[in-house]
Image: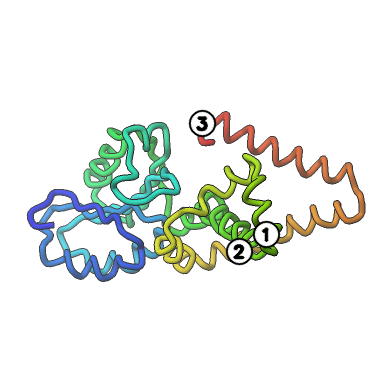
């Protein structure tokens, strides 16, 4: 960080406080500190207090990635056409926000601004909950009897493989995300369980029209994601 114009923290968010403490004495006046973390209230809480006066703080979340992690998992088109969410604290210098935004624009991203709390609620449903479900489904398959488990692996259809792909994601990163966004995540998890119960009841009682209605509603939402080029 010595003499850098821009420092971008790219580690699991559980390490942010220690990183902030380590880099603070090395930040020059006028420098910008940003990040790529998936839970922004934690960034403000853990990294923000270590930012010295005269240094700009512009948290960011490029919403792009795969189940692979580390520098070797990068590729040129990773950010193309994806969203980057900026969550600068009130009073942040506009020119600092613009510089961070331009960095991600140059990588091919579209920009959105949110408060940290709103970001965390949005990402709880669009990213954090899907990962929780994928981890759980793979865990369910692993708990089956040995013979059945082997058949699940052998005959796994594309739907199972595609849906559980993200279960290969980094455990340390996702441990930190789940714990640091627990309130929003538990809220949407409760809503999911209610929706599953609704579909479960329809299946149990043979309510074909209700099953079809629920599936059709989900299909329309999926189509809207495709139309928005985000799926």
Quadrant of the drawing holding the C terminus = top right
Residues marked 2 and 1 touching at CB (< 8 Å): yes
**Which of the two discs, 2 and 3, labels the residue nearer the N terminus?**
2
Crowding at dot 3, Cα within 10 Å, few <14 / some 14-19 / many 20+, comes out as few
The residue carrying mark 1 is 191
Q: Residue at x 34, y 63 (%)?
A: 44
Way the structure is coloured: rainbow
In depth, the one of 123 and 132 nearer the eye is 132
**Which of the two discs, 1 and 3, labels the residue nearer the N terminus?**
1
Cα–Cα gap, marks 2 and 3: 27 Å
Cα–Cα gap, marks 2 and 1: 7 Å
Cα–Cα gap, marks 1 and 3: 26 Å
Crowding at dot 2, Cα within 10 Å, few <14 / some 14-19 / many 20+, comes out as few
Please tell me in which quadrant of the rendered image residue 188 appears.
Answer: bottom right
Query: Where does the image place residue 139, in percent across and percent down from the top left?
Result: 60, 62
Quadrant of the drawing holding the N terminus = bottom left
Q: Mark on residue 229? A: 3
Q: Residue at x 59, y 46 (%)?
A: 163
In depth, the one of 92 and 52 nearer the eye is 52
For label 1, the SS is helix
Q: Residue at x 34, y 44 (%)?
A: 73
Q: Mark on residue 95? A: none
For label 3, the SS is loop
Residues marked 2 and 3 touching at CB (< 8 Å): no
Question: Can you say whether 38 is above or below 107 in the image?
Answer: below
State which mark lies toward you, 2 or 3: 3
198 left or right of 87 in image? right
Q: Mark on residue 187? A: 2
Q: Residue at x 65, y 42 (%)?
A: 157
Query: Where does the image place residue 156, in percent across and percent down from the top left?
Result: 64, 45
Query: Where does the image place residue 21, in percent across and percent down from the top left?
Result: 20, 70
For label 2, the SS is helix
């Amino acid at each position: 960080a010595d003499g850098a114009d821009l420092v971008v923290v790219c580690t699991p968010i559980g390490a942010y406080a220690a990183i902030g403490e380590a880099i603070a004495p090395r930040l020059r006046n006028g420098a910008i500190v940003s990040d790529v973390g998936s839970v922004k209230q934690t960034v403000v809480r853990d990294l923000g207090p270590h930012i010295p006066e005269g240094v700009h703080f512009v948290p960011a979340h490029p919403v792009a990635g795969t189940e692979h992690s580390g520098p070797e998992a990068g590729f040129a088109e990773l950010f193309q056409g994806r969203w980057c969410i900026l969550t600068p604290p009130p009073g942040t210098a506009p020119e600092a926000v613009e510089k961070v935004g331009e960095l991600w624009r140059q990588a091919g991203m579209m920009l959105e601004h949110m408060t940290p709390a709103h970001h965390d609620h949005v990402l709880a449903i669009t990213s954090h909950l899907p990962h929780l479900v994928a981890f759980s489904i793979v865990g369910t398959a692993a708990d089956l009897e040995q013979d059945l488990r082997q058949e699940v692996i052998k005959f796994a259809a594309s739907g199972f493989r595609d849906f559980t792909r993200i279960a290969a994601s980094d455990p340390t990163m996702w441990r930190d995300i789940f714990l640091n966004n627990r309130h929003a995540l538990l809220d949407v998890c409760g809503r999911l369980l209610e929706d599953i119960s609704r579909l479960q009841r329809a299946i149990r009682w043979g309510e074909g029209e209700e099953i079809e209605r629920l599936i059709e509603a989900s299909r329309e939402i999926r189509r809207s994601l495709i139309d928005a080029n985000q799926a």
